[in-house]
Amino acid sequence: MTQTTRLDSVEIPSLKGKVSDEEWAIREDLAAAYRMVAYYGWDDLIFTHLSARIPGPEHHFLLNPYQLMFEEVTASSLVKVDVTGNPVEPTPFITNPAGFTIHSAIHMARDDAHAVMHVHTPAGQAVSAHSEGLMPLTQTAMLIRGEIAFHEYEGVAVDLAERERLVADLGTKSAMILRNHGTLAVGKNVGECFIRLYFLERACQAQIMALSAGTNLSHPPQGAPEITAQQGEVGLPLAANLLAWPALKRKAHRLDPSFAT
């Protein structure tokens, strides 16, 4: 008997057993990431995206159904899309091809970009509007700061010509502050990408709180930010893959196991 999940009037047939084990594992991870983005309050209604590449020569990716809140996303509801953001298989959902502009550019340019996450949090947007970007005010900021690239605002990201400039600005970095827009993270897998985004968002939040408290700030001694950045480059992926992401998936299961359906 085929299992289904019902969201209002939409029935979502389970894809478990109908896709490869590798694809299903990626679907579960990405659905968990959507749920945790909602849990931490980083979602922006139905807008912004988290995407993941499906291994293979077809250049297919998983993207959220455009009309679902992040807290509703399930492994089976994720839409398999091509490089233009259009579904490659029948689906009851719609996608936002324009919203995939940023993601597709990075996925296609970077072999290591198996997951890309982009959000519009108030703290991230506030830092993106600050002339100095992310400042080395906290350990969290220093751990992620060396990985951050910047991209100037060009309007809502619907112009495909912007992809080349965005990729050039990102270079080999694994995180980005899109000026006057928001934050972005890249990872070799969903968990690594999520933890990188977590560090970036926490650092942005702490910076806004510190600046709001006054101008008498304590700055780290010379050389400390650089040392901490080097430690972050090595330690963050290890912590993400071995410790933090498995723990977050357990938390997602405790909160609502339906993400894995």
Image: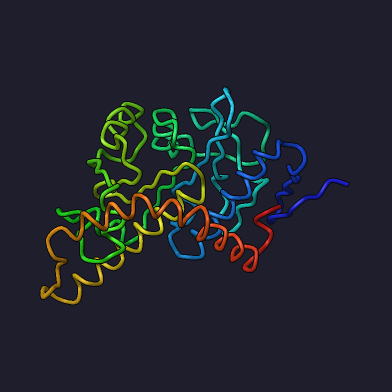
Asked if residue 94 is positioned above or below residue 120 in the image, the reply reads above
Identity of the residue drawn at 72% across and 36% down: 19
Give the quarter of the image for residue 140.
Answer: bottom left
Give the quarter of the image for residue 129.
Answer: bottom left
Identity of the residue drawn at 51% across and 32% down: 85
Identity of the residue drawn at 41% across and 43% down: 186
Asked if residue 2 is positioned above or below residue 172 in the image, the reply reads below
Task: State the residue in front, 90 or 147.
Answer: 147
> Taking 23 as reference, is 13 left or right?
right
- Estimate the x, y position of residue 223 in percent, counting from the top left: 15, 58
Coloration mode: rainbow
Task: State the residue in front, 207 or 141.
Answer: 141
Q: How many marks?
A: 0
Task: State the residue in front, 225 or 84.
Answer: 225
> Taking 83 as reference, is 131 left or right?
left
Identity of the residue drawn at 48% across and 58% down: 37
- Estimate the x, y position of residue 48 in percent, counting from the top left: 44, 48
- Estimate the x, y position of residue 66 in percent, counting from the top left: 54, 45
Asked if residue 72 is positioned above or below residue 158 in the image, the reply reads below
- Estimate the x, y position of residue 122 in percent, counting from the top left: 32, 61
Task: State the residue in front, 155 or 1.
Answer: 1
Asked if residue 39 is positioned above or below residue 216 in the image, the reply reads above
